[in-house]
């Protein structure tokens, strides 16, 4: 059996959230055809930028 996870329709973005001095590596997988793709990407980036702001 051959497993094929990405036929080119998935995009991956990696990022790091810094929380209390600890780097947390995370990734976002999204489908290219998602109608809300830009909003999802912007929200993901904002979450990583704001991580650790609440103290």
Image (cartoon, grey):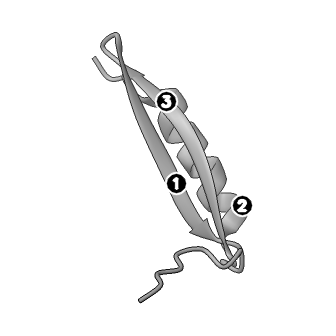
**Can you tell which quarter of the image residue 30 is in?**
bottom right
Residue 37, label in figure: none
**Dot 3 alpha-carbon crowd within 10 angstroms: few under 14, some 14 to 19, many 20 or more:** some
Q: Which residue is nearer to you in this view: 32 or 5? A: 5
Does the CB distance between marks 1 and 2 fall below 8 Å? Answer: no
Q: Which residue is nearer to you in this view: 14 or 44? A: 14
Residue occupied by mark 2: 38
The residue positioned 68% from the left and 67% from the top of the image is 37
**Dot 2 alpha-carbon crowd within 10 angstroms: few under 14, some 14 to 19, many 20 or more:** few
Residue 28, label in figure: 1
**Residue 30 vertical position relative to residue 2 in the rendered view, above or below:** above
The residue positioned 49% from the left and 29% from the top of the image is 16
Q: Position of residue 9 (x, y in %)?
A: 68, 77
Mark 2 or 3: the one toward you: 3
Toward the top, the furthest residue is: 21
Mark 1 or 2: the one toward you: 1
**Can you tell which quarter of the image residue 1 is in?**
bottom left
Residue 1 in the figure: left or right of residue 12: left
**Dot 1 alpha-carbon crowd within 10 angstroms: few under 14, some 14 to 19, many 20 or more:** few
Does the CB distance between marks 3 and 1 fall below 8 Å? Answer: no
Residue occupied by mark 3: 16
Toward the bottom, the furthest residue is: 1
């Amino acid at each position: 059996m051959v497993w094929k996870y990405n036929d080119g329709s998935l995009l991956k973005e990696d990022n790091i959230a810094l929380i209390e001095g600890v780097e947390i590596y995370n990734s976002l997988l999204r489908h290219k055809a998602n109608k809300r793709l830009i909003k999802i990407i912007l929200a993901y980036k904002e979450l990583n930028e704001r991580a650790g702001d609440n103290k």
